[in-house]
Image: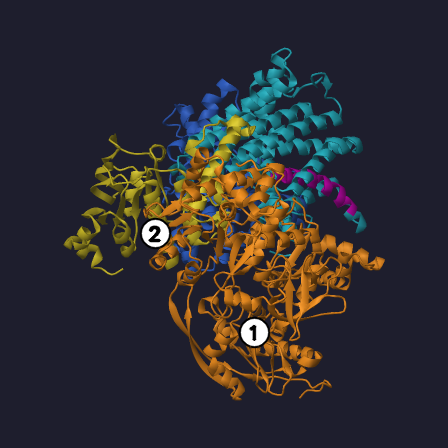
Chain colours: A blue, B orange, C yellow, D cyan
Amino acid sequence: MGFFLETLIGGLMAGMLYSLVALGFVLIYKASGVFNFAQGSMVLFAALAMARFAEWLPHWLGLDSLWLANTIAFVIAGALMFVVAWLIERLVLRYLVNQEGATLLMATLGIAYVLEGIGTSLFGNNIYSIDVGMPKEPVFILDGLFEGGLLINKEDFIAALIAALLVGLLALFFQKTTTGRALRAVADDHQAAQSIGIPLNRIWVIIWFVAGLVALVAGVIWGSKLGVQFSLVTVALRGLPVVILGGLTSIPGAIIGGLIIGVGEKLSEVYLGPMIGGGIEIWFAYQLALVFLLFRPQGLFGEKIIDRV
Amino acid sequence: MPEMASSRAMDTFPRLLFHHAQVRGSKTAMREKDLGIWQSWSWRDVAEQVGALACGLAQMGFKRGDNLAIIGDNRPRLYMTMAAVQCLGGVPVPLYQDAVAYEMLFVLQDAGIRFALVEDQEQVDKLLEIKEQLPLLDLIAYDDPRGMRHYNQPSIHSIEELMAMGRIHHQNHPDFLNDEVAQGDSDDISVMLYTSGTTGKPKGVCLTHNAFISAARGGIGFDHLTADEDILSYLPMAWVGDHLFSYAQAMYAGFTINCPESGDTVMTDLREIGPTYYFAPPRIFENLLTQVMIRMEDASIIKQKLFHFFMKVARRCGSDVLDGKPVPAGDRLLYALGNILIFAPLKNVLGLSRVRVAYTAGAAIGPDLFRFYRSIGINLKQLYGQTETCAYVCLQPDGEIKFDSVGKPAPGVEVKIADNSEILVKGPMVLKEYYKRPDATAEAINAEGYFMTGDAGLIDDEGHLKIIDRAKDVGKLANGAMYAPNFIENKLKFFQHIKEAVVFGDQREMVCAFINIDIGAVGNWAERRGIAYSGYTDLAAKTEVYQLIQDCIEQVNGDLMTEGALADSQIHRFLILHKELDPDDDELTRTRKVRRDFVAEKYAVLISALYGGKSSQFIETAVKFEDGRQGKVAADLHIRDLKTFGSAGRAA
Amino acid sequence: MNHQIGDVILDLKNVSLAFGGVKALTDISFDVREHEIRAIIGPNGAGKSSMLNVINGVYRPQQGEIILRGEHFARMNPYKAAKAGISRTFQNIALFKGMNVIDNMMTGRNLKIRSNLIQQAFWWGPARREELAHRAKVEEVIDFLEIQHIRKTPVGRLPYGLQKRVDLGRALAMEPSILLLDEPMAGMNVEEKQDMCRFILDINDQFGTTIVLIEHDMAVVMDISDRVVVLDYGKKIGDGNPDEVRASPEVISAYLGVSH
Amino acid sequence: MLYRENGQFKTTYAADQQIFPIAQDRWTILGILLIAFIAIPLLVDEYLFRAILIPFLILSLAAIGVNILVGYCGQITLGAGAFMAVGAYAAYNFHIRIEGLPLLVSILLGGLTSALVGIVFGIPSLRVRGLYLAVATLAAQFFTDWVFLRIPWFTDNSSSGSVSVSNLQVMGWQIDNPVSKYLFCLIFLTIFALLAKNMTRCAIGRQWMAIRDMDVAAEVIGIRPLFAKLSAFAVSSFFVGTAGALWGFIHLASWEPAAFSVDRSFQLLFMVIIGGLGTIMGSLFGAAFIVVLPIVLNQFLPALGGVFGIKISTAGVSHAELIIFGGLIVFFLIKEPHGIARLWSTGKEKLRLWPFPH
């Protein structure tokens, strides 16, 4: 029982991170109908920027505060993500309005290559570390309830907390602020949004920037766990089953989908994996999402598609 | 169907038909674009169906000497009916298919029509509309069954029914058809074509087998045509030109006629077929060229440069290359390059790639227009003829093309110019008579057996005939100078922006003109200059357009100055009409010739304004729309004075 | 051969349809006789299109049944309907945008295709013969609808009126016994409407096709249809020949009295 | 400009419906085939065969398969690489487990196996549409990645995880040098392209396109989405699987699962989008573009750097390659979303109308 709970909690925490990545997808899809395959590359790009600036700044400015260096690096990386968002809107999106989904998807793959190319050219392509001072040691909790307590990774716990916080903030942003409501208007109906005078282009920049920030946070968390390296790109691929499970257009869907996938992955890896050779978590997540889709083609929280003729 | 003894002379069309069915039975005689592909009939098919039709008609009571009206677009079955009627010694009478019922009435009554074969429901309806006035009419057969299910009148039959009847008839009387064909004589009337009636009532021109076969033989020999030609048959069957080219010559030489799918698709069908032998009135060549120029204006700058550069080369040496005359090696090379880059593609897009011989006739063709086609390598030639001469009097021989002549007398034709400059013609192709009009016949054929064409012309030193005008239209100005209105009008119409022109001046002190602008060309011109307009009337009244037309006319004035006797015919004043002259309003004939007197009468107020020195005139005119509704067009027309030239070239 | 109006061929009994909580059709019954032109009219949102969608199985009614030539169906599906000879056109033209006119119409011949995938891949005997035979059939429809000049044009490039005609052509290519027309004249000019009317009457007359028609233009409906059903807010409020319907007070107050 | 279509009229539907109705096109294709079959084997050196021509041919075949599914039937797939893998490994297993099975049969059986797997993974398409489906196809990708990596039976218990084939021959024809490999693949491509073209112009192709363009209308005229979609999956996977078998057997000779990773899937999708959705010709264009571009960049960039006196490192070249490649893709999508095939057909149309612009 204890082991099961441990796995479950581990899954939930990992799932929170998936939710974060999925959120990036959902934001962009909602606002611009783009299925953003470059999300992974954005994570890599942001993480690279963060890691390298945190490394360079102390040399350039003679800083000795790790915290300050990290903060400035984070701000710079955030600013970079804004530039990226602006360039993407400027150079790509505005020319592809009203194109088909597949075309847009391809375009984001193109963007992904460009981002990867530029990121590695500017910041190098080795493994870098991000040290934001997250505690690495595991802790035991609830040892009153279970024999030996539950082993929880503190780092994961904090990461999950941060992710949850960010998700909450975004939800508030969308519900309570004017910009947020404007964003939702765009998501619901491009033409309607245009007709009430919201400049679509600016909305897109904002939304890609927000997605960029989400990517930055995800990049920092993942980077500090696993090191910043090229394989961060695949983080996006792990976020995908989450979005289709939760529904492409639903923020709550992204959160709950992330949790389900996180838990499902961990449980299957632990209980099913050994039976059939291990390493199954990626495809298991996808199969899980797929089975779900067969029953609810629009995902858990997606909008129901009605055929009008 | 009938097994003709090939030894018989091929001196009637039915005999020619069965001859082809024997010697080239499987070769394609007719095609029609239908249901998306070119449906084909071999000579054998045609002979069989003609036989069946003939027997069917006989079964329905058709007798030697009867006339049968044919009304419809060019369709194989309609051509076959002509032959079927001829098999029985009857006379086909094709009518203009776009005429309304009451316009057809006269011809149908005059020819005493008992039988009619029409294309479709539309034509059946027309006949039914006037059936009361046609007591003789007792069979209407139709080709296209569409919409005909509920026509239960006993007199209406489908052509399929007729043929089915005929096939049974043929089984019961296997010798009938052969006997009928054998009875035919080359001096029998083979077809009756009604003159368009520019003046007075139409007259039925009776032409014999011999006349058309002679004309066909002469033309085919003259241009070395073979049984492998393809021709697009798209001009009205009632018109003598179509009868000569699509019927008589095809029947004589055994080549293939191709019927377009519909009026809308003629250009596409032309491109697909790519005829080797082509005939079109100048108007069509002109429209084509206008389209070429308009479309080229939208082309990229490089293409335009290329086009104009090579067109210049073509103008310089194209005709000579075509005529096989010596051309400098440099030009020859440039022309060859131009052929790859411009001329050949252009011909391909126009559908004229395969043309070996193309003819134009029916009206004067502008020298620029004529030169354009010849210079890009299309062997376009002019011919001269009339309904009464099977459209066959003069032809331009290869290599002897003069832009202002219609060529030399065709084989077997004798041409003479009378003292009053009228052209007189003698030969086998001259009409036998006007139907039931001995008076008119006597008027048209003089004592020596010459047919009086009514055209004024002259023969130059090299024996080429040059047409000036209708003999009766040649008049005099008040000062006694010669005045040839058509000559002037033609010069005006050679401008792409001018569609029609009517000039006045007979017995008057100066020449004035009505102009119709070409809405396509001028509209495009206006669009490119950002001139907005709402329709013809509006566009025609624009100052800019007036200036454009004024420039054109003043060029003509400059031209006329050099024409000696006609120098006094320069145009002094003009106006642009507020509506297009239209056959539906009786202003033009069905062949689109201006009815000068009618126009003069209808617009008398405008004429008096022109000669009265007014600078504008209000006019309101009733018009008929395509759907038959009536309406009115009104406008305040400007009148402009023009620059004219004295003989020394100074402006007066 | 004359196509006299015959027995009931299609009978709808107590059909009710709802989307979520919204009732689109409430307890509708009416029948269609063989060879007749049957019109369904009603204001916007009256449930006319839903009615057609129920008949050919795009929507599944919660209640009621459809009796087609004596066979009872609780619900249709589009394939069964097509098999049974029901074809239709769409209010918002639903042509296949990536294909030309001929190919759009060829899809209408789909149910009559017998050759299999392998034969088609090799363009082999039966497949080839079939393609050519069906092309000939399609050409007849093209000829019937007088759209020869656009036969190879991609449908996306056609003006609206012609697209409607091609839509009708695709339905006709199925050689249907019952043809459902969803506002065939919507958005057309006078001339196009006249053409369309003529085609509808010709189809009914020449092929004896039973036609169920939704149309907004009252004049047209009263002119060409044999019997009319009137719907309002998903309920049937009138049924009968045009004169009866015109005279019904309920219809007048609900529909005819209101200017549209 | 070079088209002379006057007189090319059609008197039968057979003539009207042939693949290349215009005579000039027929001659062009014949010319290209002659060059491909005769001139190239005589003239081209080994490097080009290995680096460009053979990959081009095989990937073209796969791209045709992907195009059938994505371009013709409108079902986006991100799992094409998986079906190449299935084709390759299935063919391998047939090859080594059935003694004396001819090479051709092994390869085709590989394709068939892939078709069956394709049908299974196509089932979600009946419920799921558009981008959801695209992601669902990734499931196939990751599943097969895992299967061939983790289940030793498929790799004949090879300790390294890689498998290899050798001594390939077809009826005594040794496929051992680049020229023979090239010709072998070329024959495959020619025949398969013809089959694909036939299908797409027949009833089945129209069913696919109908489903793609307007699925409700398609159903209403009696097209069963089940059959249309699954047949598209099957045919597509057959083509892709066959290409996979050729890729393994002919091009690589020994390979690991990574040869058919998700990158391969993306690459194939790029080919059909850049080449042109819904055209057979476009698949070839796309394959050529994607195969040739990196090689050109590889040669060209250092040379360009040299001109400006900059020495570009190998890593630098590969980064720049990524950027340019990505940029070009975006550029293409913006400038010609219908792909190279559209450029081709526009060009052809221009030539037909030359000298007129329209």
Which residue is more in the foreground, C55 or C165? C165
> Is disc 2 surrounded by few (<14), some (14 to 19) or many (20+) residues within 10 Å?
some
Q: Residue furthest right?
A: B329
* Residue under the point 75% across and 45% down: D301
Q: Which of the 4 image quadrants contains residue B450?
A: bottom right
> Crowding at label 1, few (<14), some or many (≥20) Cα neighbours within 10 Å?
many
Q: Residue at x 72, y 21 (%)?
A: D175
Residue D189 in the image: state x and y as whole percent: 64, 30
Amino acid type at image mark 1: Ala
Q: Nearer the viewer, residue C37 or D315?
A: C37
The residue lying toward the viewer, choosing from D202 and B632, is B632
How far across and down, in percent of the image, does residue D178 sit? 75, 27
Q: Examine the image and state in which quarter residue B563 appears.
A: bottom right
Q: Secondary structure at mark 2?
A: helix
Q: Nearer the viewer, residue D300 or A236?
A: D300
Q: Position of residue A228 (x, y in %)?
A: 60, 39
| In-image side of D58 versus C192 (left or right) | right
Which span of residues is magenta-colored? D278-303
Which image quarter holds the C terminus of chain B? bottom right
Residue A161: x percent and y percent? 44, 41
Where does label 1 land, which residue?
B501
Question: In the rendered image of this protein, does residue B631 appear above or below residue B301?
Answer: below
Q: Amino acid at mark 2?
A: Cys
**Pointer 1 with pointer 2, Cβ within 8 A:** no
What is the secondary structure assignment of the residue under circle 1?
strand
**Residue A257 seen in this snapshot:** yes
Instruction: Report in which chain the residue with disc 2 lies.
Output: C
Decide whether residue C215 is among the magenta residues.
no
- Labels in figure, total: 2
Mark sitting on residue C197: 2
Q: Name the magenta segment's main secondary structure.
A: helix
